[in-house]
Image (spheres, rainbow, N blue to C red):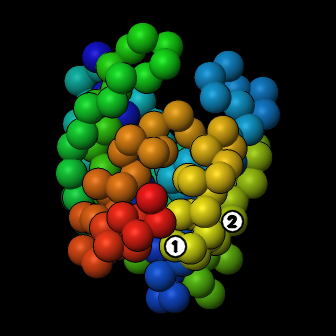
Amino acid sequence: MIKVAVLWIINEHDEVLLAQRALHKAQDPGVWGPAVTGKLEPGETFDEALAREVEEELCLKTADYTPRFLLEIDYSHPDGEVRRFGIYATTIPKAKAKIIRIDMNEVARIRWFTMPDLVEKMAQHAKELVPSANSVWPDTFKAMWPKTHEILRSSA
């Protein structure tokens, strides 16, 4: 089992920041996923991995955001490995997001998405998203925004 820390970043307009994985990545290159994802190193907790990955991928210090733990969920990746995601969310004002500096070794680009954008991408363009999107994101969105499950259900 591979453990992965995940951070969803939301702004004051309920837009979600997604990161497009670097195009040279061996696994899932060029697909869109949560703002930050990263495997835990041996002996590391989800909290420790999250802080390390956020700084590596987006150059944000722990003083720049306050993560809220949402859930832990297992996912069977197409590569045959099970991923255990420790999923967090934080809110950052869109104006403050200007301090984000992406690591081009990890992230090709970032972009804000509205919930309708995400629902449409999940339904019509799932191949543009990380493989776990349609399996894991609905539970994640429900934990972030309790009314979201109604939006997702009505679009199915």
Count of labels shown? 2
Splitting the image into 4 quarters, where does residue 117 fall? bottom right
Amino acid type, callout 1:
Met
Q: For the point 36% across and 34% down, which residue is it? A: 4
Q: Is residue 95 above or below residue 104?
A: below
Splitting the image into 4 quarters, where does residue 22 fall? top right
Q: Is residue 96 visible?
A: no
Residue ID for mark 2: 111
Q: For the point 56% across and 39% down, which residue is it? A: 130
The x, y position of residue 38, in whole percent, is: 46, 36
Q: Nearer the viewer, residue 35 or 59?
A: 35
Give the label on residue 115, or none: 1
Amino acid type, callout 2:
Arg
Within 10 Å of disc 2 (Cα), the crowding (few <14, some 14-19, many 20+) is few
Separation (CA) of disc 1 from disc 2: 13 Å
Q: Is residue 138 visible?
A: yes
Contact, CB < 8 Å: mark 1 with mark 2?
Answer: no
Question: Regarding mark 1 in the picture, which secondary structure is present there?
Answer: helix
- Say left or right for 128 vs 57: right
Q: For the point 31% across and 67% down, which residue is it? A: 149
Q: Nearer the viewer, residue 47 or 124?
A: 124
